[in-house]
Amino acid sequence: MDLIFIRHGEGEQTHNLPASLHKRNPSLTKKGMDQAKKLKDSLPLSTQDIVFISPLVRTMQTAMLWTDGMDCRKIVTPYVSPRMFPLLANKHTLPCDVMMEVENILHTFPSFELDDNPPVALWNEGFNTATEGEFSKHAKDFLANCRRLKKEKIYIVSHDGTITSYRQLISGSQLSRDDFPKETEWFQINC
């Protein structure tokens, strides 16, 4: 199975740093919207494809613009929510990385569905500041769920730290912030 991890387009949280990091649920910028639309050319989808999406506005907007007009499955899951990388002790989740409330997701993005596999605690807290052991357990659960789908490839719209954490877990290689994907950059990993 190939996992194709895609970083979301440019978000409003990247402008006017560090103050912009304190904005809750920042949207894509105009540039980010254009980046997301261009994914249609570089990563064309079919109706058989599945796209897992982090429950933040910028990732869901990226997926919505990329999948527009394509009736593939779009599943929002906290298994690909923001992840601090590297994990720093005594840090907390910034407002820009707080997940959207579950009850608002389907109202705002009605063509999406919610993943019913994650534990409720993961929906409430995500794993931004979870220990490496906790992240590894959740990530392995997600990968096992993906394997059960019996697809040749699965797409995942997520965040730089999350993508790098999964890449490190799957490859067994030590990665750093220098390995972060740029906006709408993608990595294909065989798992």
Image (cartoon, rainbow, N blue to C red):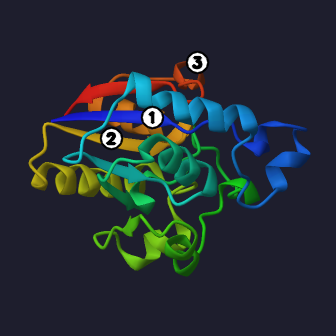
Q: What amino acid is labelled 3 in the image?
A: Asp
* Nearer to me, 96 or 105: 105
Regarding mark 2 in the picture, which secondary structure is present there? Answer: strand
- Nearest to N terminus: mark 3 or mark 2: 2
Judge whether residue 174 can be spotted in this image: no
Vertical placement of residue 158 versus 6, above or below:
below
Q: What amino acid is labelled 2 in the image?
A: Tyr
Query: Left or right of 29: which side holds 136?
Result: left
* Nearer to me, 140 or 50: 50
Q: Residue visible at 36% across and 52% down?
A: 52
Residue on which the image places disc 1: 6
Confirm or deny contact between disc 1 and disc 2 (CB under 8 A). yes
Query: Left or right of 135: which side holds 60?
Result: right
- Nearest to N terminus: mark 3 or mark 1: 1
Q: Residue visible at 60% across and 68% down?
A: 100
Q: What amino acid is labelled 1 in the image?
A: Ile
Residue on which the image places disc 2: 155
